[in-house]
């Protein structure tokens, strides 16, 4: 593991965490989420290839689509729409789709807008989607795709600024003959055209993890020679201030964006550790971004820490622990099943008014996620979506699978994100 130590971590985290600061940039116009009242529903589920909506704990799922092969649902910021990947096209690439939560307004963008896992994202403040790959486009429900920027090459990664007015993306230039080109990082702010912020060297790739929670910088990994094998063993997570200075290394991590989570407005939590297997030598660290310093949240002998959850608007954190196995352990179904059965989910708050660490659940637990206020924690256990609230315990919301664990790669990373999505703007505790 490569880590810049900060012995005074908990003193640093005791600083008051303030609201997300603004950053610049221009985006296409869509419905502004701030003008809409959050609807009273919670979950989008995929069942038999179609999308369903669950509006209350234990409620009957309401069907939204018919005859699709949907996956990776994602709520718009105001909760009125769900974007998803559809695979019903015969012999054509998977495509982007959107549908209203009332089941109306289904839009399939067809070959005009191919989509894949992790290659589309809602603007945080408007009902506008960015989609990237062979190009970079925006789309609004029921509208026609538009190019967001003129691209020469392949867009490897993209991120919206937290205030929705800017964005960043990385491009691999066209490749016709050796040497392999290096990725270029572009940033757009305050309505300006995208400009080059950083160029990789020596044929390396750049993969965005996202913006700083306050929008004042970027987090990314640099991948030597665009090597999937090297990336699988861990890459340096780098922090780049948009105001001044060059990149600064935070830690070595696996390049999973979901493993880089906000902790208030000025810090992130992430899983540090080298090696491609999730079951050994992985620890939870918090990083102060302006200082580019990191320190361990908690040392647990014989255990790994995985799947962190945090929010930009609170000091609440959650994470999963599991037994630290031998690096030589095989990722066979039986080994992973036993390892999953030993998982435990913890929650805490850091800093002023800290909430002591509590064990939320144990055994076959995955995908923790906080609501925006850091008061309600959603997670999946044994194929059930559940919700934890401070001082009130957990309740079941809906069943998503008869399986105890989601499809799990040989190296131990697992997520139910292809099967369900949560709209964290609707507090279940109000029902």
Image (cartoon, helix red, strand yellow):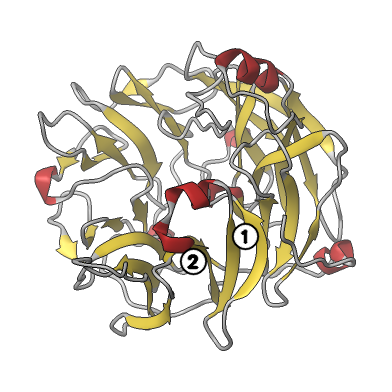
Q: How many numbered discs sit on the rendered protein?
A: 2
Quarter of the view holding residue 190: bottom left
Tag of residue 261: none
Quarter of the view holding residue 343: top right
Above or below residue 94? Residue 64 is above
Left or right: residue 414 versus residue 130 is right
Quarter of the view holding residue 85: top left
Quadrant location of the N terminus in the rendered image: bottom right
Q: Dot 2: what SS?
A: loop
Residue wearing tag 2 = 162
Residue at (28% x, 30% y) in the render? 70
For label 1, the crowd category at 10 Å Cα-Cα, with few meaning under 14, some 14 to 19 and many 20 or more, is many
For label 2, the crowd category at 10 Å Cα-Cα, with few meaning under 14, some 14 to 19 and many 20 or more, is many
Question: Is residue 171 in view from this perspective?
Answer: yes
Pick whichever of labels 2 and 1 is earlier in the sequence: 2
Pick the residue in front: 145 or 100: 145
Residue at (56% x, 88% y) in the render? 244
Alpha-carbon span between mark 2 and mark 1 = 10 Å
Residue wearing tag 1 = 312
On the image, the x and y values in percent for residue 136 come to 24, 63
On the image, the x and y values in percent for residue 141 come to 22, 50
Above or below residue 77? Residue 159 is below
On the image, the x and y values in percent for residue 253 come to 62, 53
Q: Dot 1: what SS?
A: loop
Pointer 2 and pointer 1: residues touching (CB < 8 Å)? yes
């Amino acid at each position: 593991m490569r880590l810049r130590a900060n012995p005074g971590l908990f003193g640093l985290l005791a600083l008051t965490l303030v609201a997300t600061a603004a950053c610049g940039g221009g985006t296409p116009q869509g419905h502004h989420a701030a003008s809409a009242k959050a609807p009273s529903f919670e979950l989008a589920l995929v069942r038999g290839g179609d999308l369903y909506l669950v509006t209350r704990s234990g409620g009957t799922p309401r069907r939204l689509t018919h005859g699709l092969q949907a996956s990776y649902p994602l709520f718009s910021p105001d909760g009125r729409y769900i974007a998803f990947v559809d695979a019903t096209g015969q012999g054509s690439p998977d495509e982007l789709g959107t549908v209203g939560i009332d089941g109306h307004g289904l839009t399939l963008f067809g070959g005009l807008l191919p989509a894949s896992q992790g290659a589309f994202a809602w603007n945080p403040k408007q009902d506008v989607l960015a989609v990237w790959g062979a190009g970079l486009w925006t789309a609004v429900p029921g509208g026609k795709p538009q190019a967001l920027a003129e691209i020469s090459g392949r867009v490897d990664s993209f991120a919206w600024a937290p205030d929705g007015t800017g964005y960043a993306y990385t491009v691999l230039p066209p490749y016709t003959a050796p040497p392999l080109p290096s990725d270029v990082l572009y940033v757009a702010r305050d309505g300006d055209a995208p400009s080059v912020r950083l160029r990789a060297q020596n044929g390396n790739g750049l993969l965005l993890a996202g913006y700083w929670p306050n929008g004042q910088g970027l987090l990314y990994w640099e991948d030597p020679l665009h090597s999937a094998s090297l990336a699988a063993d861990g890459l340096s997570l780098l922090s780049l201030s948009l105001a001044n200075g060059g990149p600064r290394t935070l830690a070595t991590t696996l390049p999973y964006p979901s493993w880089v989570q906000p902790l208030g407005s000025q810090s992130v939590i992430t899983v540090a550790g080298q090696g491609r297997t999730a079951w050994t030598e992985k620890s939870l660290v918090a990083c102060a971004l302006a200082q580019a310093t990191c320190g361990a949240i908690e040392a647990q002998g014989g255990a790994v820490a995985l799947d962190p959850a945090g929010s930009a608007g609170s000091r609440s954190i959650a994470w999963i622990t599991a037994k630290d196995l031998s690096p030589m352990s095989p990722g066979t179904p039986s080994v992973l099943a036993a390892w999953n059965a030993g998982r435990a989910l913890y929650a805490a708050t850091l800093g002023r008014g800290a909430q002591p660490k509590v064990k939320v659940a144990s055994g076959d637990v995955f995908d923790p996620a906080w609501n925006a206020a850091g008061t309600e924690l959603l997670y999946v256990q044994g194929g059930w979506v559940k919700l934890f609230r401070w001082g009130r315990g957990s309740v079941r919301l809906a069943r998503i699978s008869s399986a105890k664990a989601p499809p799990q790669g040989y190296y131990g990373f697992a997520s139910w994100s292809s099967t369900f999505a949560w709209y964290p703007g609707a507090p279940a505790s109000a029902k």
